[in-house]
Every structure is written in structure tokens, then in C-alpha cells.
Amino acid sequence: MQEADFSIHDSLLGKEAGTPERYDASLLFRIPRSENRLKYGLADDSLPFTGVDVWNCYEFSCLTQGGLPVSRVMKMTCPADSPFLVESKSLKIYLNSFNMERFEPTVDASLQRVQTIITADLSALLQAPVSVHFYGKDSMEAVPFQGIPGIEHYIPLAEQEAIQFGHYEETPSLLTGTPTGEEQEYAFTSDLLRSNCRVTHQPDWGDLFVKMRCQYRVDFASLVQYLVSFRKENHFHEEVVEMIYKRLWDTFRPARLMVAAMYTRRGGIDINPLRCSHREDVEPAFLSPDMRLGRRWRQ
């Protein structure tokens, strides 16, 4: 496992990597969250949010003691205040290291043992309590953010088409609104979000979800322009969500705010960060240990 001082170019991301034959925790690579937070005024000891990152890993497998393959979907939940996040390709290769490893005589016992191992490895790596759960083909799923309207509810598509877009790098000055002196409540989802991996610069596609209570009338044309301005940004998924949260927080001074994104899977893993001002606003589907996190249409 890596020390706090690191170079992202030491990770496996963007490099050719083989498939390990034996379990190997040293394959994991962590990234300090503070490395990007400092750039836009977030300090780890005074975060304006709580929240979680939920990773759905669709390609987990191991063997029973007799060599029977065990295949499951794994959900990993990590608190947003952990000092580190795990680099995605290292997690994929690490999970692959279980593929040919034999564990207990039964499927259930093997999964229990593997769950204990992975929970301990990730909690130690990220210096935070990480939860790990496995789901079979008949497991229940919890689909989040049901009933939230699209951003078109506030600004129709025809009005979006009339906007002249020219900013494709994150531009917080685009965000505008009018103080009202009265509380306004907003809830919307948008599929306009696209950013790029910080290392490989390959595109990442996400569905964005926002709930906000503030004393501003939000200019939704400016909000659409702001979301589009991420199109050439190079950041990890968690960083993008925190940037959007911070810009909305600074601009509209909300009494309550929740920002989440559910990203399209890459390499058999999708990453779903959620940040909110009040713990009770964490989407229940993100926390449920009994149900896997349901996918949105683009995942």
C-alpha cells in the first residue's frame, strides 16, 4: 500500500497490466483527496458536506476450496471524509487477484471470508471505515432519485438550444442568480455532464442529481452553461461532484444542498459520489446493505 506522498503516474491507470494469479493487496493504490480539494478552497478538517462514494464492481469472482467459481456484484461504500480515495484501475486489478484464489468449502463461507479480507484491506488503505457487500443475480436493487425531474423542467430544450456555448473548461463565474429574500427549492437531474479522466484523459459520462434550498432564483441558462463547461476538464469522478457542490455552495449560499453523480461504468466498475450538507439527505439507496445500487439508464 502506498504512502501519502505519491505521484499519480506511479499508478496502473493508463498502463498495460497483466491479470494476477494470486490475491495481492499491494496492488491497491490510493490518492489523497486533499490534492485536488485545495485547488478550490476545501480543507479536509472543515468540509461543507458529508456523503459517500459508492462503487459497483460487476466482475468479482473467486473460487471455493474445491475450485467452484463464485461470481457476484460487489458494492463498496466509502465515506466522503476519508483522507484517501482508491484509484479505480488498481481496485480492478486487486479484485482480479481473487479470481484464481481458493477459499472455503462453500460459496457462502467463501464470500464471508472474502468480504472480511476486502473490507480490512480497503479500510486500512483509505484510513476510514469501508463497507463491502456482495449481491447475486436474484438480489434486490434500490434505484435512487426516483421522481426527480430533468433539468428541462426549469429550462426547456428549445431554450437550451438557443444558448451559445463557448466554455468547455470549468468556469464558476458562469453561475448566476437573483436574490429573492424568500426560500426557493430546486430538484433536478441532468445528463449533460461529461468530464475526462485526470490521467488518461478518456471521457467520463455521468448523470447529475441536485437538490437545493436557497434564497436565489437560479438562472438555469447559466447553470446549463456551467455544467457543459466540464466537457474538457480532467478530474476524477469524486472531484467533479465536489467541485460542483462547492461552486453551488459559494454562489447560492444554500440552506440545504445535495449533489450526486452516477457515472457510466468503465472496466467493470461504476463510481457514484454523493455530497450533501445534511446527513439525512444521503439517498437511502446509496447506503442500503441489503440491496445493490440500481443503475440509471446510461450505466
Image (cartoon, grey):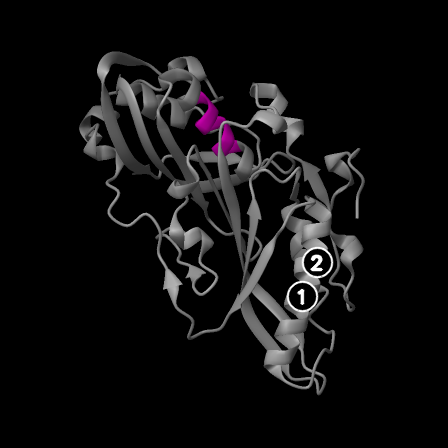
User: Taking the image as drawn, is residue 218 in sight?
Assistant: no
Left or right of 257, for residue 239: right
Identify the disc placed on residue 174: none
The residue at 39%/68% (across/down) is 140
User: Mark 1 and 2 residues: CB-CB less than 8 Å, in contact?
Assistant: yes
Prevalent SS, magenta region: helix
Which span is picked out in magenta?
A: 240-247
> Which amino acid does the dot numbered 1 rest on?
Thr
- Of residue 283 and residue 154, the one placed in the foreground of this image is 283
Left or right of 166, for residue 6: right
The residue at 75%/59% (across/down) is 18
Identify the disc placed on residue 116: 1
- Could you tell me residue 50's position as x and y percent? 50, 36
Query: Which residue is labeled 2 in the image?
Result: 120
Residue 103 is drawn in which quadrant? bottom right
Quick check: is 164 in the magenta stretch?
no
Left or right of 243, for residue 127: right
Question: Which SS class for mark 2?
Answer: helix
Residue 181 is drawn in which quadrant? top left
> Which amino acid does the dot numbered 2 rest on?
Ala
- Could you tell me residue 92's position as x and y percent? 65, 56
